[in-house]
Amino acid sequence: MDFSFSGEREAVAVEKNTGYPVKMRKALEEIAVFWASFFYTGKSPKAPGTVGSLAALPLAWGAWAMGPVFGWSATLFIFISGTLAAKVIIKRTGETDHQSIVIDEVVGILITTSVASNLWWHYLLAFLFFRLFDITKPWPVSWVDQKWKSALGTMMDDTLAALLAAAALWLALHAHEWSPVLHRSEEHTSELQSR
C-alpha cells in the first residue's frame, strides 16, 4: 500500500529522458543556469556580456597569479563545464546564444589576460580588446557565430574573439620593442642617466 502524498510521489518520479528524479533534475538545471550566467551576472538588464566580462576579471587575475598551469587548467574546466551549462539555457529558451549566457565571456577574458602581467592597466586593455572583438566579430568569429548554432558554437566564437584580442594585446604591450623611435628615446634616456 502506498502511503506517500501525491507531491512526494511526484518528487521521486523519474523522467524517461533523463533518468533523474524531477527535483534532482531541476536542482541541476538551476546550478547550470547559475554557472552559465556566471553567478547571475548574465541576468543584468543592461549589457550582460559586458557585466559578465567585468565580473570575470578578478577570477582571471587570481587564476593567472597561480601560474600558467593553473590558469590554463581553469580555462579548460570553465570551457567544458560552461558548454554543458549553456545547453540548459539553450534548451529552456530555444536561443543558441541567449544573452544570459556569459560563461563564454569568462573564458574569453581568461584567454585574453593570459598574455598580460598583473598590472591593472594590462587587465583594462585586455577587457577593452576582448569586448571590441567580441562585439564586432571579425572573421572567423562571425563565421562560427553564424554557422555553429549550438552550445559549443556559443563558447567557440568568444574563444576565437579572445585569441584575436590576446594577439592584439600582446602586440600592444610589445610594440615599443620594434619601434625605432622609442628605441632611440630609451637609449637617449639611458645616456642621460649614466652621466
Image (cartoon, rainbow, N blue to C red):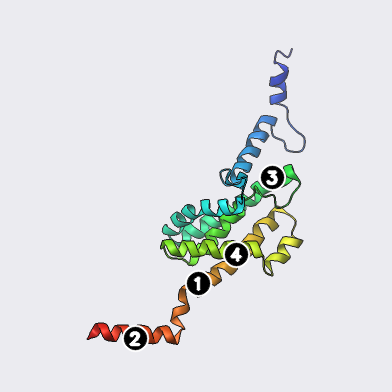
**Label 1: element kind:** helix
Residue 39 in the image: state x and y as whole percent: 56, 43
* Residue carrying label 2: 187
Real-space Cα separation, disc 3 to disc 1, in angstroms: 34 Å
Q: On the image, which quarter does residue 132 sit in?
A: bottom right
> Eyeballing the image, is 92 above or below 157?
above
Looking at the rendered image, the disc whose residue lies closer to the viewer, 4 or 1, is 4
Residue 89 shows which numbered tag?
Answer: 3
Q: Tag 2: Cα neighbours inside 10 Å, few (<14), some, or many (≥20)?
A: few
Real-space Cα separation, disc 3 to disc 4, in angstroms: 25 Å
Tell whether 39 sits left or right of 186. right
Q: Earlier in the sequence, mark 1 or mark 2?
A: 1
Q: Amino acid at mark 2?
A: Glu
> Eyeballing the image, is 51 above or below 116?
above
**Residue plotted at (52% across, 57% down):** 73
Residue 170 shows which numbered tag?
Answer: 1
**Label 4: element kind:** helix
Real-space Cα separation, disc 4 to disc 1, in angstroms: 15 Å
Q: Amino acid at mark 1?
A: Trp
Q: Nearer the viewer, residue 171 or 69?
A: 171
* Residue carrying label 4: 132
